[in-house]
Amino acid sequence: MGLTDFHAHLAPTPEAKVRLLDTMNQLGITRAVVVAGGLVNPTTLSRQISNGGGNDIPVPNEAIWKLCSESDGVLFPFYFANPHQPPIDYETNGEKFFGLKLGPAVHGIALDDARTVAYLVQAQKFGHPVYLHCLSRPGFDIEALIAIATGFAKIEFILGHAGIGNCDFAAVDRIAPFSNIHFETSGGFSSVIKYAIQKLGIGRILFGSEYPLQDPRLELLKARVTEMTHEALHTNACRLLGLERAHA
């Protein structure tokens, strides 16, 4: 039985890859979606989540792709957009990635900003799913997500970290009518996850860990407590990654 972690971070070093793969092997995680990690330190990130802000921070997407390409089909890289820069590199190299990641808390650019939208236009051309975080201010919030998900109805969006904060029942209610918005579980309260399963259906739930900021053992325990099925733990991820036959 496969088990896919839909949200892990990887520093661009061979040592970081070894640590991630060792952790996955110990816990029975067979695949992971990864994006570049360590772009800002945790203190800065937490301050920007709370207060806003961000910078033109380069992302080592090529290095992440190379590490994943040497993982024997275990690690699946998403391209981490830096909307401060036009999507020229994404247009050129994005096809070898499996999706797009937006991190407005890192770069400080809103989801509905024209610079972000330029990346979404390209993601739609590639047929990429788009993973993103929402923040509690206009342009970055659940309403902004709904606006871009409506405008790009062919894109499958993944709302990361169970919404905003760890108790976002309201986000579940708001995204319920929009079938192209999926719900990734890392960081959310178990009660919110149970509510999302009931409200959205198991087909829109994706297990994620937020490795290495969160110990995956805690998220796996939450998966058991909330009675996530194999769909949420693996097959939904396979479908979004274009691996429909890789369900075992």
Image (spheres, helix red, strand yellow):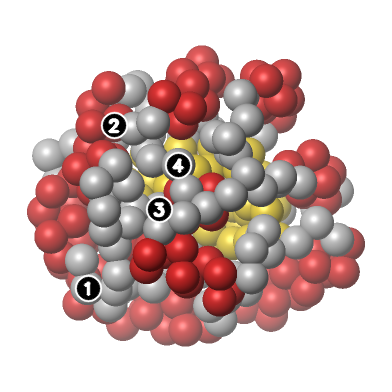
Tag 1–tag 4 contact (CB < 8 Å): no
Position in image of residue 167 (x %, y %) = 22, 73
Q: Which residue is mark 1?
A: 167
In this rendering, the label closer to the viewer, 4 or 2 = 4
Q: Position of residue 139 (x, y in %)?
A: 29, 42
Q: Determine whether the residue tagged by mark 1 lies in a helix, strand or loop.
A: loop
Q: Earlier in the sequence, mark 3 or mark 4?
A: 4
Report the amino acid beneath label 3: His
Q: What whole-number distance in Å separates the C-alpha atoms at marks 1 and 4?
A: 24 Å
Point out the tag, 2 or 1, that comes first from the N-terminus. 2
Sequence-first disc among 3 and 2: 3
- The tag on residue 109 is 4
Residue that mark 3 sits on: 133
* Residue at 64 percent of width and 70 percent of height: 41
| Amino acid type, label 4 | Ile
Q: State the residue position of label 2.
A: 149
Q: Residue at x 29, y 73 (%)?
A: 166
Q: Residue at 19% across / 56% down in the picture?
A: 171
Q: CA distance from mark 4 to mark 2?
A: 17 Å
Which is nearer the eye, 65 or 236?
65
Residue 106 appears left or right of 169: right
For marks 3 and 1 on the same chain, the one whose residue lies earlier in the sequence? 3
